[in-house]
Image (cartoon, grey):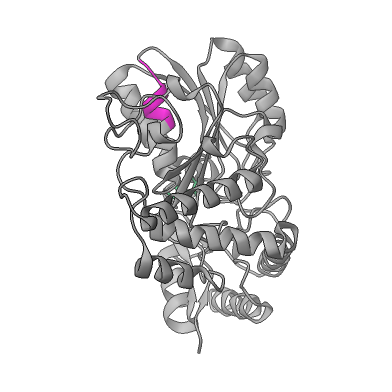
Amino acid sequence: MLSSYLDNAATSFPKPDGVADAVVQWLGTGAAAGRGSHSGSGQAAELLTQCRSRLARFLGVPDYRQVIFTQNCTDSLNQVLLGLLKPGDRVIASTLDHNSVLRPLEWLRESAGLEVSMVDFDPATGLIRLDEFETALRERATKLVVLTHASNVTGRIQQVHEMIRLARQHGALVLLDAAQTVGHVPVHFQSLDIDFLAAAGHKGLLGPLGTGILVVRSGLETQLRPLRFGGTGSSSESLRQPDEIPARFESGNLNLPGIAGLNAAVQWIETQGLQNLHVRIDRAVKRLHYACGSLPNVRVFSSPEDNAGILSFNIEGMDCQEVAMILDQSFSIQCRAGLHCAPLAHRTLKTLSTGGTVRLSPGVFTTDDEIQQAIDAVSQLSSAIG
Ligand SMILES: Cc1ncc(COP(=O)(O)O)c(C=O)c1O
């Protein structure tokens, strides 16, 4: 039996045609950008500009230099949190946040006296409680609001327009963690009116692992202390780190093979049309919800509407890791079970003490047969109980 990959929320697989070729081609001919006095180095610089411009167009970023290449979404989030926040600052985050937000915040809270205000979500809808959010904003001046665009546990897309409006009204900066939405639904940096956008290159954008993106609002770059200092291939006469973006945050050689793959991946998305890709995942995730939600002994923690592509569930009386193991070993279905690096979301869903949930996350290449195979497998497991 061919295996079905339903773990696209972790990283997308397979990648579109052309991505692996672009990586291999780069490895065969590549050089370092800004680090050579030859045409190969010029080609590398050209690739960076091409991929940056493509991403800027795709994400509604006015100037391509605002697009900074990172290693992954975690790296992008750390750059903003550790680079911006100072002792005594206040941040509003939520229980939906991933550990890539929660852990840097906890570090800053313990080591630098950062004040962190956590807002909860409603487990019935998966939506951050707007009343709690507004109350937190009113309490005290807030430097930064971190918004998870869609939860990686429930897939629920948040009411970010309203939350950004409220944050702006109270003078807070906004960091959007779009790890689960970029490449799934339109994310337009300028129209959203946010200050920082963090995303992965290897999830919805369908690029290779080891690629991430940070977008910084023009003018805010000098408020961010770089986390890495060093050679940028520019202004080499100066011992000071450049103020200009992207160089300010891109010290050391970049992951050019990965960026070559990412460039090919985003080009493929542009050709297919984001809306068409969205429809494929949306249809798959709705089918999973409608079928699994009506099975006996199955408890679903996500909902089919406004979902970035995730079904989260448990089978009564079975450990979620055991379910995932059986799905893998007996049905060749690859998924992820556990806390998904989002322990507070599980605390609110009341699945923390039982070890989390099983997560199925289809991708743009998931077939109707694979969805049916998953439904049949969950059905067999659930009916074997009791
Ligand atoms: C909401 C959210 N934020 C951040 C991350 C971290 O992304 P990365 O694996 O690219 O570091 C993830 C990964 O699953 C995520 O789901």
Quarter of the figure with residue 374: bottom right
| Residue 320 locus on image (x, y percent) | 45, 63
Can residue 11 be seen at all in this image of the molecule?
no
- Residue closer to the observer: 141 or 23: 23
Q: Is residue 356 left or right of residue 295?
A: left
Q: Is residue 74 left or right of residue 178?
A: left
Can residue 62 be seen at all in this image of the molecule?
yes
Helix, strand or loop for the magenta stretch, by majority: helix
Q: Give the range drawn in magenta.
A: 80-86
> Outermost residue, bottom direction?
1
Name the quadrant of the C terminus: bottom right
Query: What residue sits 40% from the left and 21% below the top?
Result: 85
| Residue 140 locus on image (x, y percent) | 54, 10
- Residue closer to the observer: 287 or 318: 287
Query: What residue sits 65% from the left and 46% below the top?
Result: 57
Query: What residue sits 30% from the left and 18% below the top?
Result: 112
Is residue 123 located in the magenta-colored stretch of the structure?
A: no
- Residue closer to the observer: 201 or 382: 201
Q: Is residue 229 left or right of residue 152?
A: left
Is residue 83 located in the magenta-colored stretch of the structure?
A: yes
Quarter of the figure with residue 330: bottom left
> Outermost residue, front direction?
38
Q: Looking at the picture, does residue 271 appear above or below residue 238?
A: below
Query: What is the number of callouts on the image?
Result: 0
Query: What residue sits 63% from the left and 14% below the top?
Result: 170
Quarter of the figure with residue 325: bottom left
| Residue 235 locus on image (x, y percent) | 34, 30
| Residue 260 locus on image (x, y percent) | 46, 60
